Amino acid sequence: MIKPKSGELPDILIIDDDKTVIMALNKALEEIGRIRFALDARQALSMIKAQPPKLLLLDMDLPDINGLKVCRTLKGNPDTADIPVLFITSNSELGFEEAVFDAGAADYIIKPLNPRVVAARVQTHLNYHQAIQLLEQLAKIDSMTGLANRRAFDERLSVEQRRMYREREPLTVAMIDIDQFKKYNDHFGHIKGDECLKGIAQALANNVRRPADVVTRYGGEEFALILPALYTSKDKGRNRLSYQSVE
């Protein structure tokens, strides 16, 4: 079981208009996560936009918007699509399961609630979601240098291009290639060649300071930088170019 570190309990949002259910869920989950709650869909959607939770417990029958519609709305938004949704319901009619999973939910819990079952289901889905996120992060890291890889570069560039057009800000992409690297590798050997790549990767990472900047190993001896909203010294704007040379 993947347990959260001290002080890093995951945020769990309960969406239910029955305060008795909210109290029961809070008691069952208080040692697993930081509990927030909303009494209707509109309040919940506002809370999710402000601070997306790690998991949602969603009542099927809310007073303003049907739970299935809320789930489909969340799954249709890239910013919230990967949040696990567990339905809470007393509905067990034919076709119910298909409707829940078709809406994108991860699971459902039938009322009356069993605290041990609720805690076990929630912990299982939190663990699974954390493991998936870890795998996705590892899939975007170059194992040799520790930099972001080509896949991460392509995804981030797509995001920054859309931001560039939307906000009318400059976008700088720098491609860096190591001269004569094959000769160096052939002469000194692959171990020294790997050390060279790691050294250059570290030098680049040390010189890319802004949170929005990204340095990646593009492939082989090639590196790439994504530098959003970067201005030169001639501009009076913010984020001026002030990087040190890499020797």
Image (tube, rainbow, N blue to C red):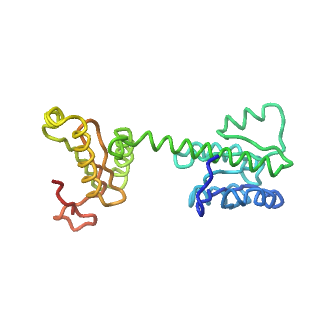
Name which quarter of the figure residue 177 lies in. Answer: top left
* 14 on left or right of 130: right
- Residue 178, percent from left and from top: 17, 41
Taking 91 as reference, is 164 above or below it?
Answer: below
- Residue 238, percent from left and from top: 28, 66
- Residue 191, percent from left and from top: 25, 38
The residue depicted at 20 percent of the width and 64 percent of the height is 235
Name which quarter of the figure residue 95 lies in. Answer: top right
The residue depicted at 35 percent of the width and 40 percent of the height is 154
- Residue 198 or residue 81, whichever sits in front: 198
- Residue 108, percent from left and from top: 75, 42
* 213 on left or right of 96: left
* 236 on left or right of 133: left
The residue depicted at 51 percent of the width and 44 percent of the height is 134
The residue depicted at 69 percent of the width and 56 percent of the height is 32
Which residue is the extreme one toward the bottom? 236
- Residue 75 or residue 112, whichever sits in front: 112
How many numbered marks are there?
Answer: 0
- Residue 223 or residue 236, whichever sits in front: 223
Taking 125 as reference, is 41 above or below it?
Answer: below
Taking 184 as reference, is 49 above or below it?
Answer: below
